[in-house]
Structure formats: C-alpha cells, structure tokens
Image (cartoon, grey):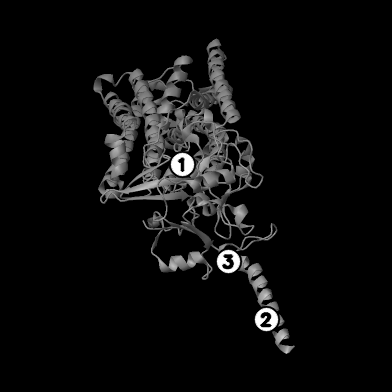
Amino acid sequence: MKKVAFAEINASNGFYVLLLLLGSVVAVGLGAAYFMEHNGHEVTGMNNQIVWGMPHVFAVFLIVAASGALNVASIASVFGKSVYKPLAPLSGLLAITLLAGGLAVLVLDLGRPDRLIVAMTNYNFKSIFAWNIFLYTGFFAIVAVYLWMMMERRFNKYSHNVGLVAFVWRLLLTTGTGSIFGFLVARQAYDAAIMAPLFIVSSFAFGLAMYILVLVSAFQMTDREFGQGIAQRLRSLLGVFIGSVLLLTLIYHITNLYATEHHGIEAFILRDGGIYTHLFWFGQILLGSILPLIILFNKSLQKSVGSLVFSAALVVIGGFIQLYVIIIGGQAFPIDLFPGYEVTSSFYDGVVASYTPSLPEILLGFGGVALALTLTTVGVKVLRFLPVSLADKDVDPHHKA
Amino acid sequence: MSEETNQDRRRFLGVGLGAAAASLAPGVVLYGVAQAKTDSEPASNKVRWGMLVDTTKCADNCDKCVSACATENGWDKHTGRAETRPQWMRKVTLKDKVTRRTTSLPMMCQHCEKPPCVDVCPTNASMKREDGIVLVDKHRCIGCRYCMMACPYKARSFVHEQVTDQKSYMPRGMGTVESCTFCVHRIDKGESPACVEACPEKAIVFGDMNNANSEISHRLRLFSTTQIRDDLRLNLGVRYEGI
C-alpha cells in the first residue's frame, strides 16, 4: 500500500457556486430563525401539545449523525483497519461540522436564544441537557485534537490513544442524546433505557450515510478516483448498521408490546396512528431500512457506486422519518393521566395532538444542514482532509493490478 | 351602687372580649390558610403548601376557578391559535370506561415534592421553593421546553406570542415557560389562591399540609384522597377527593 496523499480541493468555479448555494440556504435559515424569534413560536407549527417540532428532528438528526460520522476515523485508528486511514480526516471534520449544524438549529429554536449565556453559566447537573452542553463542547475539543494528531505527521503516534478517547466520548455523547428521551417518565413513548443504545446504533447508520454522501459527492466534484474496494467496505458497513437499528427498533417495540400498559402507544405507532403509522412502516422500515438493505446486498449492484449513494440517501431520509416518529409521534400520543377513564378537556387531554410543520421551522432545519455542509466545504478547501485518490491500487493493500 | 358598678364591669368585659374576638378571629382563621411573610423573608420548609380538591362538589359545566386564575395571572388574553393557548389551569372531565360515571376536576401544576420539570431544567429556571411551590424563574428560562416534555401532568404552557397588559406581580414573557404558581403573590400576603376563592362550591381547600391543625391536614386525615399518577411517587401538593 502506498503512502496516502491528501490535498485541498481547488478553488474552481464549481466550488464557489456550491459555496454560494449552501450559503444562501444558511442565510434563509437564519432569516427563518429571526422571523420565529421576532414573532414568537406562534408562527411555527409547534404548540403546547407538540412542544418539540421540526427543528428538533433536524437538530437531533445532525447531532446523532455527527457522532456517527466519527466512526470511520475510529475504525482506522482505534480498531487498526489501515484501509480506512485515508477516510479518517474527513470523518473527523464531518463530526465537527454536523454537530455545529445541529446545535445551531437547536439554539436558534430556543424561546430565548439571546440567553444562551445563561445556559453556559448556570448548570443543573441533574439535567441531561446540562450534561449535553459539556458532552458537545468536549466533543468539539477532543475531535479537533484528534484531527491534529491525525494530520500532523509528527503526532501520528498519538492518534490511536486520542482516537480511543474520542470514540468513548462519542458513545457518551449519543448516550446523552438518547437519554434526553429515555429519561422522560411522563410520556408513554419514552421512559425506556433502550433509547440510548437505539440512538447509538442509529448514529452509526445516519453518520455513515452522511459520510458516504459527502465523500462520494466531493470525489465526483473534484474528479478524484473512487475505487471498488472502499465502496465495498462502506457498503457492508452500512448494511450492518441498518440491521442493528432494525434489531433495536424491534426490541423496543417487542418490550413495549409485552407490557399491557404500553399497548396504547404501540397500537398508535404500529397500527392506528395515521400519519405516524404510515411514516413508521413505509418511511422508516420500508424506505429507510429494507430497501437500502436489498440494494446494498444485491449482487448485480455490487459494482455500482451510485447504488451505494442511493442507499445512503435512503438511510438519511429514513433516519429523519425515524426521528420524526419518535419525537413528534411520541408527543402526539396523549399523556395517560387517568388510566381506566375517557378524558376530555379544553387543553386537548385524551386526544391525539395535531402538528403541521411550518415553513420557517423547515427552513431553519435545512439551514442547519447547509451550515454543516458549508463548513465542510470550506474545511476541505483550506486543509488537507480529502485523499487524492481512493482508487484500489492506492488504498487496498491486497490490490492486484 | 355596687350592683351598678358590677353591671358596668360586665358590659365592659363583654364589649372588650367581643372586640378582641372580632379582631383576632380572622387572624386565627387565616393562620390555617396562610402565614403572610414579608418580601425579604425567605420561604420556609416548615410549610408545605397544598391543595385538596373535592371532586364530588366540582360541577361539570363550571370553570369559575379557571377564569379566576386566568384573570388573576393575566393569561386570559390570547390571540393566537387554539393549540397555543396558555392553560395554567384547566377543567378535565373523566368518564369511567366501565361504569360510565363522570367526574369533573381542575388540573394544574401538582407542585410535586420531586418535580421532574426541576430535574430536567438545564439552567435551574424551574425551581421549587422551600415551601413546596414549583415556579419558573422567567429571567433564567431559555425556552428549551424540556420541562414541558418532562411534566407528567401537561401543566406547563409556553408563551408563543407577545404578551401585553401583564400583571406587575406576575410577569410573563414570550419565549418562556409558565404554569400555576399557587398564586404565590397572594399566598405571601396571607391570602388564598384565586381559584380557591372563586369556587362557588368551596370544593378547593388550600393550606399548609405540615400544620396538623390546618383544614387541609384535617381533611387529608379524615378522607381517602388520590394523587394523580401516584405510581411516579412524586408526592404531590395537589390531592383529589372522590376519584
């Protein structure tokens, strides 16, 4: 295997057009946030029943994907798979930029984003949100150091140990994100310890899918060679991750179905929930899991990088839908305050809460995605995150010409 | 002569005692409801404020407690969508699925001893006073709504729109979370919450659950009462009779 060469991308017209496009989406997202903050959340689809809406779906997706994007680097430096080494720097960069995009959405959706300093100076250490502030800022710092160790030849020898710290930290981070929901005793859809491992395996899938989309797009746009060897490895890895998410989703629902008290929420998500039921079966399971699995493991498509990219795109869409069902569906199901009674009130007790996402919320969400991609684009322009080639002859130690 | 004097003395004593009783009685009665405190005096953990709702007296079509709360605390004006209407207090109607018996009751912040909203609040804006009243510090709330996700009673509202004509004693702010305060501004002056006073059936009793002589303690000792979702073991400040 040759020594891997990395290079910045060229400042072509395409680069500036891409930057302008992404920058415009970021600007629209910021405008949407300003509109929401100026007029209050009245202009969103969120309400006193569905208190977390579309911005949270985007933010949680990006944060979860951020930790998952780092896996590629971990496989190289923690688990010693040298074939992944050329992929590692971009993995670290994406971990940072996706997290930045997710946090931007989360913060800009706050009722009082101007009080962020309050959140930075007053901590309730029993709050998982407060833990997450440390987990997120720590993640930025650790991954930045990790990237430094990886990209500065003199420090390469430390990349295993720092990589190990980053790997453990990313597991903690996703545990923290899953536990936001797992620790909520009030609502029937949450209050489950499995939320943390479910979010961890979901991060593996979402992060790798985002990584594949960015990597292949960057290689396409910069005319770099992408070999079958790498594609094959990413294909198998994505398949295993999708399977793991399916397994934990199955365990979550089977566990709930075993306990009579959870039959209401299970019937709602799996059978009677209208939009949420459709999204679960057709969006998350069929479109986001079964279909990519069929494509990824279909022998006739094994040589097509396009099929890998298509599968990754399906996993991303399925991931958004999965989080929509968890976050919005979980809130739409009425809180069971009085078991054994039919409940009515002027505050939507006992009825399924309605939610129609508004345009500003969706634009804010896409603004976060665009911010992550803008930072990534600038990153690969100014520093050597991308390998010059991923052709089999350059990266596969067992390649025979 | 001596006979006259004695009668004067009796009259004097009678009027004096009557006046004394008249001036002391409200204080004695009020003592069971509330101990007024000055603004500089901290809330004491010797007190645990509580509310007992007798659902057998609560009429299905009456929401005087809710309107009194809205007027008192200034959340009665709402111009936005119905789903974003704040509701510090609401009337809930229950129908037993088997017996079809219906019950009506007011729902509001249950002022838990171990409030989940306080646990999850990242900035300590959700807090519990020493006397058991759960409040939101509107200056510290960043509007993340995690407390609304965590509250098992759906007792909190988020202010979705600009608010005007606020009460000086109960500031509200767009982008922050709010809920029943047990009318803390009234309690601290030695008065009862607005809903308690507004109830025509006197179905709500308010007082210090730590004081064995208070009416609420007396009632809690005598009658079987319910804490909603007592499986969560949150030791609530609001108890219900008749469900």
The residue singled out by tag 2 in the image is B10
Q: Where is A151 relative to B40, above or below? A: above
Horizontal side of A184 relative to B121 (left or right) equals left
Residue type at mark 2: give it: Arg
Q: Secondary structure at mark 2?
A: helix
Q: Secondary structure at mark 1?
A: helix
Horizontal side of A158 relative to A286 (left or right) equals right
Label 2 marks a residue whose chain is B
Label 3 marks a residue whose chain is B
Residue B92 in view here: yes
Residue B8: image location, x then y, percent: 71, 81
Q: Residue furthest top?
A: A13
> Cα distance, mark 1 to mark 2?
79 Å
Residue A383 in view here: no
Q: Where is B37 relative to A143, above or below? A: below
In the drawing, what numbered circle is on residue A177?
A: 1
Q: Residue furthest bottom?
A: B2
Disc 3 packing (10 Å; few <14; some 14–19; many ≥20): few
Front in this rendered view, residue A111 or A42: A42
The residue depicted at 62 percent of the width and 53 percent of the height is: B185
Residue B199: image location, x then y, percent: 49, 52
Displayed quadrant of residue A335? top left
Residue type at mark 3: give it: Val
Question: Does the CB distance between marks 3 and 2 fall below 8 Å?
Answer: no
Q: Where is B4 relative to A2, above or below? A: below
The residue depicted at 38 percent of the width and 39 percent of the height is: A330
Front in this rendered view, residue A207 or B88: B88
Question: Does the CB distance between marks 3 and 1 fall below 8 Å?
Answer: no
The residue singled out by tag 3 in the image is B29
Residue A97: image location, x then y, percent: 53, 30
Disc 2 packing (10 Å; few <14; some 14–19; many ≥20): few
Disc 1 packing (10 Å; few <14; some 14–19; many ≥20): many
